[in-house]
Amino acid sequence: MHLRHSDHDHGPATVEVVFHIEDPVGLTGDEDKTEVRTMAAKGEHLLEVAVEHGINIEHACGAVCACSTCHVYVEQGMDDLSEATEAEEDRVEEAPGLQINSRLSCQCEVEGDGPIVVRVPAWNRNAVKEVPH
Ligand code: FES
């Protein structure tokens, strides 16, 4: 699915965003990439930042808040992200393994100065791949 990027231009990448990846082989093709340190610009969404750095978080609906495959856990820096909308809250409840720090990465816009730490669960990927046809 094509990833919809934010429409506006972003400023310089000044916010540290660290991704902890539970399934590095599945998401990056590299078993050593359990942690990826990135710099993001304010206004970017976490999903965009991840994909730009080779972390292939599923985004089955194309980042329009119509699935829950881009589910992540925000371990640090929740206040540096845009607040969840009602639509996101409704949708994220469908994600397996829901936690208090669950967010949809396509809906989280970087707003503060960070650092932001995000855990990408392994089963996001599997949830899509293993659905019987
Ligand atoms: S990609 Fe579908 S809700 Fe984020």
Image: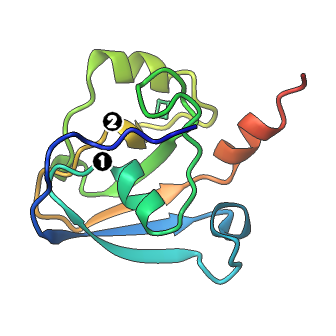
Identify which residue, 71 or 49, lies in the foreground. Answer: 49
Quarter that holds the C terminus: top right
- Which amino acid, by three-letter code, is at mark 1? His
- Which amino acid, by three-letter code, is at mark 2? Gln
* Residue neighbourhood size for the residue with mark 1, other residues' Cα within 10 Å, grouped as few (<14), some (14–19), many (≥20): many
Q: Which mark is residue 111?
A: none
Report the number of discs: 2
Residue 38 falls in which quadrant of the image? bottom left
117 displayed left or right of 21: left
Identify which residue, 131 or 118, lies in the foreground. Answer: 131
Secondary element at tag 2: helix
Q: Is residue 43 above or below residue 113?
A: above
Residue at x 50%, y 22% (from the top left corner): 93
Residue at x 47%, y 26% (from the top left corner): 92
Let me know if residue 102 appears in the view: no
21 displayed left or right of 12: right
133 displayed left or right of 78: right
* Residue neighbourhood size for the residue with mark 2, other residues' Cα within 10 Å, grouped as few (<14), some (14–19), many (≥20): many
The residue beneath circle 2 is: 107
The residue beneath circle 1 is: 45
Q: List x then y, in percent, for residue 107.
A: 33, 36
Secondary element at tag 1: loop
Q: Is residue 33 above or below residue 46?
A: below
124 displayed left or right of 37: right
